[in-house]
Image (cartoon, rainbow, N blue to C red):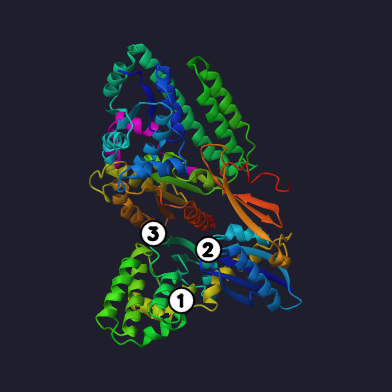
Amino acid sequence: MKTYLGIDVGSISTNLVLIDEKNQVLSSLYLRTEGNPIDAIQRGLKELKKQMPREAEIAGVATTGSARYLAGVITGADLVKNEITAHAKGASFFVPEARTVIEIGGQDSKIIILENGVAVDFAMNLICAAGTGSFLDAQAFRLKLPVEQFGELALKSKNPTNIGSRCTVFAESDMIHKQQIGHTTEDIVAGLCQGLARNFLNNVARGKNIKPPIVFQGGVSENLGMRKAFEKALKEKIIVPPHNTVIGAFGVALLVKEQNPQKIKFLGFEISDKNIKCTSFQCQGCPNRCEVIEARIENKVVARWGDRCGKWSNLNVNN
Amino acid sequence: MKKPIITFARWGNYTIAFKTLFEQLGLEVIPPEKTNSETVAAGAKIAPEMFCFPMKVTLGNYLPALERGANTIFMIQNVGGSCRQRYYGVIQEKVLKDAGHDITLLDFRATPRDIYRKIKEITGASFWQILKTVRFSLRELRLIEKIEKMAQFYRPREIKKGTTDRTLQESLLKIEELKEEKAFPKLKKEVLKSFFGIPIEKNKKTPKVALIGEIYTVCDPAINFDVESKLGKEGIEVYREMDLTYHIKKLIFPWKDWIIQRKINPYLGSTVGGHGRDAIYEMLHYVEKGFDGIIHLLPFGCMPEVTIRPILEKIHLESGIPFLSLSLDEQVAEAGINTRLEAFVDVVKNHHEYKIS
C-alpha cells in the first residue's frame, strides 16, 4: 500500500501525518518540539513506525513549518513547502468552499484568503506573538490551569471582562490587575480569549477581506474559548476541520501525493536511531558573512545551506 | 587641513560608480564596507533607535572604512525626495563625532550646481575634468543598471540555476576593476556578450512580479535579502522601475511628477514625501499591464511608504492582484522573509495559472 508522510515542524509542536492513496489519514502524531526539532522528528518517526500498518510503504515525504529545511534534509523529503500553502491545502480539502483560513500555531498566526481552493492572499504576524499558543500556555501556567481546560472554562463565563490586548505584555499586566480587583477566573479567561481574537483581527487580519466560510485551525483552534471569541467578533460561523491541530502536516502530505514523486528520497525509519548533528559557522569568504548550517548524520556531512553564493551548498557533500 | 581620504554612503551595486567618480577626480578613496550583519549591527548600535533603517546601514558601512583611515564622508541630501533622508548628513556627523571619530562630513544638496561647486572646492579639478569624470561614472552606472535588468530577465529562464547570478557578480567585479574610460566600450561589449552566452529557454512564459517602494531598499540586494534573485530562481521575472537613473531623470525633468499626480489623483491629492507617489503610480501601471504580483519594500520607519501602504492595499483589494508588503530593518530575520516570499510565489503562480485558464 502506497502512503505519503507529511511532517510539520513548528516552534512548539512537531506533527506527523500519514495518508494513503485515498487521502485517508492512517495515523497522526502531535508531539512537543521542546526546542529540539531533530530529536522531535526522530521521536516522531519512531512512534509512527509502531503505529503504521505493516503493509504500508512510504511513497513520498514532505516537510513544512519553520524547521522545514532541516526536517527535509534529515528525512530526505521529496517536497519542502512553506506552511501557508500547506495550511491552505489542508483547509480546502476538508472545506472546499472555504474563503478564509485562520491558523494560530505555537508562535505564529496567519490568515489566508482562498479563492477556488487556492491561496490568493495571506498575512502572518510580524512582531507580536499575542494570542499564539505559547502565550496561552504561559497564561494557563500562571493561572495554574491545564491549557486543555482553558477553553472550557472560558465558555462558563457569563460576563467576560475586558482585557487590553494590544500586546502580550500589556495583556498580562491587565490580567493580573483584573485578578487583583476580584474578577473570577472564568471571566478573565473568557476576556483574554476575546482580547486575543480582537488582537488577531486588528493586527494580522488588518485590511484583509474576511468572507465566510471561515475555517479555524492550528493548535489554538482546540481552545473552545477562542472559537467562541472569533465567532462573536466576526459574527460568522467558525468551522474547525477534522485533524485541526495537524492540518499543516496533512496538507503537505496531500501536496506530495499530488506531485507523485517517482524516485523516493526517503532515508528510512532507521534515521531515528542515528546520530544527527547540526552545526553552523560564519563563512568568511566575502563580506556577506552568510551563516552556513551543516547537517551531519553519523558524522558524515549530508547537506549545507544558508549561503547566498552556493559555495557551500553546492559543495560535494561526500567528503 | 589634512589630506581628505574619502568614504561615502554605500548603495548596492551603484557603489562601484560612486567609487569611480571620486577616484577619477584624483581623490584617495576607501570604499565603505559591504553591508552584512556585522556592519548593520554596528550602525544600529550608535544610531538613534527610531531613525529609519538606511541611515543605520550607511552608518555601519562607514565605520570599517573610518578605521582604515578615511576621514571625510560624502553624503547627498535629499536623494529620496523630501523625507528624513535630508537629515542623514547632520545626524550622521553628530553620531560619528559623539562616537569619537574625527571626521569631516560633506553634506550637499543634490542639485548639479551644488555638487559641482563642492567637488571643485575639494579637488581643485578643472571643469572639463569634472565633466569627464561625471560622464565616465554615469556610463558605468548605466551599464550596472542595464545588467541588473538583464539579470532579471535571464534568471527565470536560465537552464542551469545560478548561472545568471554568477555572470552578474563577475561582470560587476570587472566594472569595479576598470580604471580608464578608454577601456569602457570594450568592457561593455565583453559584459553584454557574457550575458548573451547564458543558456536559456527563450520562449518560456513566466509570471511577472514588480518591485515597488523605497528606492534604497528596492535597489540594494544586501538590504532586501536578495529578493530579486530569490524570485528569479523560483521562475519569476522581476520588474523594477526604481533605480538611480530614474531618480536623476526626475530631478532634471520635474514634469514626471505632474504625470504621476494626474494618474494617482483618485487616491492621493498631494505628495507625501520620498517616492510615495511613485509607488502608487507604479502599482496602478503594473495592474494595467496585467502583472501577477506586486512586492512593496520599505525600510522600517519610512514615513512616506508607511503613509501610502493603505492605499496600495486598497488597490490590491480592488484589482485582486497579489500584494506583499515587507518592512525591513535590523530586527527582521531572513527566515521570516523567506517564508513569506515562498508563500507569495505560490500565490503568484496560482494567480498566473488562473489567468491563463
Q: Earlier in the sequence, mark 2 or mark 1?
A: 2
- Please give the residue where the numbered disc 2 appears in the rendered image: A83
- Please give the residue where the numbered disc 1 appears in the rendered image: A221
Q: Residue furthest front?
A: B100
In the picture shown, does residue B254 fall above or below B356?
A: above
Q: Residue furthest right?
A: A55
The secondary structure that most of the magenta stretch takes on is helix
Q: Residues within 10 Å of mark 2 (few under 14, many from 20)?
A: many
Q: What's the distance in space between the residues labelled 3 and 1, CA to CA?
A: 21 Å
Q: Is residue A297 visible?
A: yes
Q: Residues within 10 Å of mark 3 (few under 14, many from 20)?
A: few
* Residue type (three-letter) at the residue carrying disc 3: Ile
Q: What secondary structure is found at the residue carrying circle 2?
A: helix
- Please give the residue where the numbered disc 3 appears in the rendered image: A127
* Residue type (three-letter) at the residue carrying disc 2: Glu
- Which quadrant would the N terminus of chain A be assigned to in this image? bottom right
Q: Is residue A78 visible?
A: no
Seen from the viewer's position, the closer of residues B61 and A113 is B61
Q: What secondary structure is found at the residue carrying circle 1?
A: helix
- Which span is picked out in magenta? B238-260
